[in-house]
Structures are given as C-alpha cells and as structure tokens.
Amino acid sequence: MFRYIGRRALQTVVLLFLVSAIVFAVIRLVPGDPAAMQMGTEATPQGLARLRHEMGLDRPIYVQYARWLRNVAHGDFGVSWLSKQPALSLIQRRFPATLLLTVDAALVGVAIGVPLGILGGSRPGSVVDGITSTFALLGVALPSFWLGLMLLLTFAIGLHWFPPSGYVPLNVDAGDALRHAALPAVTLGIGLAAPLARFLRAGLLDALRQDYIRTALAKGVTATRVVLRHALKNALLSVITAFALLFGGLLGGAIITESVFNWPGIGTLLLNAIEQRDYGVVQGVVLYVTVVFVVANFAADVVYTLLDPRIRYE
Amino acid sequence: MWRRFQRNRLAVGGLVLVAAMVLTAALAPWIAPYSPYAQFSDIGLQPPSRAHLLGTDTIGRDYLSRLVYGARISLLVGITTMVVAALAGVVLGMLGGYYGKMVDAVIGRFLDALLAFPVVLLAIFIVAVLGPSMLNAIVAVAIVYTPTFARLARASVLSLRAQDFVEAARAMGANDARVLGRHVLPSTLSPLIVQCSLGIGSAILIEASLSFLGLGVQPPTPSWGAMIGAGRNFLTVAPWLAAVPGIAIILAIIGFNLFGDGIRDMLDPRTAGRRPSHGP
C-alpha cells in the first residue's frame, strides 16, 4: 500500500512540474512584451532594457522557466503588474472568502445530494428515484450563473430574505456572514449536489446487486440496515473516485458564482486581473488553484487506498 | 437499434429537444420575427408585448429574435468544439496507443497535465491569454475536451492493436497510416460519437459561462450566455432579460445529454439504465 501511495506521490510531483510548465508556457502566449506592459506609458528604451533584464526576459526560455519555478517553489507566485504586490499575498487576502463559500457550498451539496442519492439508489424506479433522477438531470444542465441570478431575483430582490451581495467575514459576525453566504452557497452547492446524487445513486445500484447484499438480506438484516451499513460503504467509494470531477466543478463553479454575487474571493480576483490584463496575478491564481486541485486529488487517492483494501496490491 | 432508442422515452425526449434546437438554428431567419441586430425604439427595455413577444433589450432590439439566433451560436460552438477536440484527441490517442513506449508516455503525460486543471479554470485561463472572442472560446473548450477523446481513442487502439484483423492488415503490407485510418479508426467510432453528443451539452454550458463573464462571444453577436450577462444589470426592471436565455440553455443541455445517453444505450445495451458520468 505504501508503495502504491509512494508511486502516486511521485506521479503527483511530476504532474505539478508539467502543470507549472503549461501555465508558464501559456502565459507566454500573451501578445506583446511583458516588460512594456508593466511600464505602460512611462516606458523608455533604456528603462525597458533594464526591466527586461531584471525580469530575465533576455535569457533563454528554459532559464526563465527554471528561475520562475525556483521562485514558485519558494512561495513566490509572481507579482501583480499593476499594484506590484506579490500575487500570493493578494490570493491569501481573498482566501477566507473563497473558503467560506466553498465549504458552505459543499455542506449544501452534501445535505441535498447524499439523501437524494441514497433514497434514489435504494429504491430504483420509485417516486423518490424519479425526483433524484430529475434533479440530477436538471442540476447538471443548470448554468450556475443563471441559477444565481434567479435566486438573487427571488430571495434578495423579491422577498428580501437575504442580502443581494456583499461578504462579511466569519469572525466579524457569524450570523451575518452566513446570511450573506447563503445565496452564493446554495447556487454553488446545487451544482455539486446534482452530480453527487447521480454518482451515489449509481454506486448504490451497483452495490445492491452484489452477492454480499443478498447474503445479508438472507440472514435477515433489514433493508434499511443493508443499505446504510453494507451497500453505502461501497457506494461512497465510487463517489471518492469521482472526487476530481466534483471538486473541480466546485472550484470552477466558485469563480463564476463569485462573479454573480460580487463575492470578494479568489475567483473575482482572477476575473478582475483578466479584465485589467494583469497577467502576473492571472498566472499566480491559475497556478495556485491548480496546485490545490492536484494536491487534493492526491489526498483523495490516498484516502481511497486506505478505505479500499482491494486496490493495495495493484 | 432504432427500436431500442425509441423504447427509451427519455432519449426520444432528448432527440425532440435537439431537433427543435437544430431547426430553430437552421430556420432562424424565418422563425425570428425581426433581425437580431435591428433596433426598434429609442427606448430599450420594453416589456413583452404583441409586437415584441419577449420585449426588447437595453438598446431596443427584439429579444425573441436574438434568442432564436442565439441557438445558432450555441450549436456552432458546441459542434465545432467537439469536432476539433475529437480530431485532436483521436490523432493524439491513436498515435500514443499505436506506437506505445516513448510516444505514448510523452503524449500521455501532457494529457494528464491538461486534465489536472479544473475544467472551467483552464477554459478561462486560455481565453484570458488569447483574448475574448468566439473563436478563442472554441479553441479553449476544444483544448479542455481533447484529453477525454484522446483517452477514449487510445483505449480502443490498445484493445484493437492485438487483434487478428489488424495483424492481418499489417501482414498484407498496409502501412501505419492505412492500418490506423482504415482498420482501427472505424472501430473506435461509436464511443467517440457518444462522447461527442454528451460533450456538446457541456461545451454549450462552458461557452455560455465564458460569454456571461464577457470572455467568450462578443457583442453584438447574440449569445445566450452574453445575453444573461447583459441582463444581470437589469434584474429589477427587466428580469426576463436574464431569465429567458437561461431556460434555452437548460433545454439545450438536457436535450443533448438525454440524446447522448440514448445513443450510448442504443450502441451498447449493456449500459442501459445507468446514469452517465459526464459533465463539467
């Protein structure tokens, strides 16, 4: 098992190198000279040459990459071209808002998706299963930005139940923080609940077909207990397999949801940076979020290995 | 085979939705009451009326006409991205699967790295660098979906490579290109077709998201996502501007998803009754 985890760890490190190379290469596709863009209207030939040298732009591309990678490894994710602030400190300042949003959304997603998935999967063909399947079908098709606007229209503008936008840190006023986070979290959470319910339902359907379920039922274990104690464990494994898809959807959805609700998180940081053509921040955010994603996927893999003994000898 | 498709009521529903969308797009000039670019009144934001069934947008263009023409954009983007992604993916996947070893390792690691990004983030990143436009949105979504197709193609090639008819073709003197093109490719087609029809729905959704953020299709071209993006600023005075295009997007995606599921069940009855594992 440890050998397997070790191999996955090594693969993850290689993957991080490749991901960083792609981010580095893609940023270089930006038309124009980064030094000229940074200096803007104050550019002089001498100043440009000096800045290009400072930024290492006069060196071969692989030297630039190595230098950049060394900086990243030391926690230097680049500098904003506009404010000259380190991208990482900008990200860290926005991090609590995004964390609050994604954690709340994950809670909403689990609270809706898990019961629906279990009820649907344990009674295929029933009314509840119909609801689960319809919800899963609709939820995947719902554009999160549209859902967000409709919730905003109904519950903020129409009913005044929730504030239309704004972010309150959790440590300032917890109740107010959650009230402000409610609509964005539901928007993002429904996007998670739909695929979650679908995977859980499919996993349960598969598990309930297995022989050990028939054995348990034959022994006289009640149906509820069979579902919750025996089948659910294996069904959850299939959900963990889909972790990358679910978590990736959550991260991508967060960017869009933040834009809808003007939520001051990492997503709006990215979108503002794109608008202002601040590629220093764009690069930093893309790399940061992707590293988080890759590491989380590795963690999910480790959890999967620990939970499912069958994979250990592969 | 068609019988099996028909028996699946959901799949038929999907076919109806897809057909409706294709017809709307194809017949847009006849269906739409006006040109999607014509400005009718000095004052925009007219509520729905008999002359303008869905009202007018901020600068007085007929909203229904823009919605109808929007079907063209969504379809165009959805189909083009899948064709491009499928072509690129098949070439990469077949090369890797057929030649194996180094070629496979290099292509494989590169595709793994692309898959390591969250889908929406990668698409946003690519258009951010290339600049906002419909073409770049197509490029971005196609890149995002290329690995999926490559993996499918590679898996098929691997299972086919060892089979007798491929061996026979090679023994008869067919070169690599001929073996891949004439013998291997046809056998990989059906999973690719299924993936295409499922992928069109996701591509439409990502394009709409990009356009909503202002990173995709640019005005004045009518795109459903961009229409919602423009309508968001008028939620209190003209809520239908944001609401209506969203319903069109939902119907389109549901249509392609159900249709794709139906084709898959038709081509491979073993999976019938299971839910798919797709989506962004």
Image (cartoon, coloured by chain):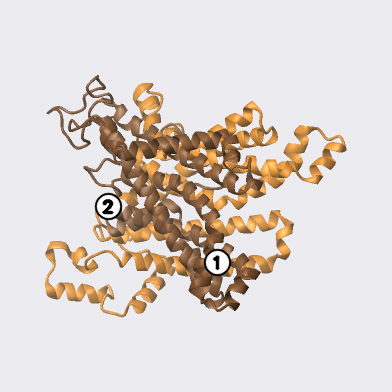
Chain colours: A orange, B brown
Q: Quadrant of the N terminus of chain A?
A: bottom right
Along the viewing direction, whichever of B175 and B88 lies nearer the viewer: B175
Query: Which chain hosts label 2?
Result: B
Q: Which residue is mark 1?
A: B183
Q: Which of the marked residues, 1 or 2, is nearer the chain's N terminus?
A: 2
Q: Quadrant of the C terminus of chain A?
A: bottom right
Does label 2 lie on the same chain as label 1? Answer: yes
- The kind of residue on which mark 2 rests is Ser
Residue furthest to the front in view is: B172
Along the viewing direction, whichever of B15 and A10 lies nearer the viewer: B15
Residue furthest to the right in view is: A219
Q: Which residue is mark 2?
A: B133
Q: What is the CA distance from the residue labelled 1 to the residue labelled 2?
A: 39 Å
Q: Quadrant of residue A229?
A: top right
Q: Quadrant of residue A283?
A: bottom left
Circle count: 2
Compared to A282, does B225 lie above or below?
A: above
- Residue displayed at 41% across by 69% down: A21
Side (left or right) of B96 relative to A157: right
Along the viewing direction, whichever of B234 and B97 lies nearer the viewer: B97
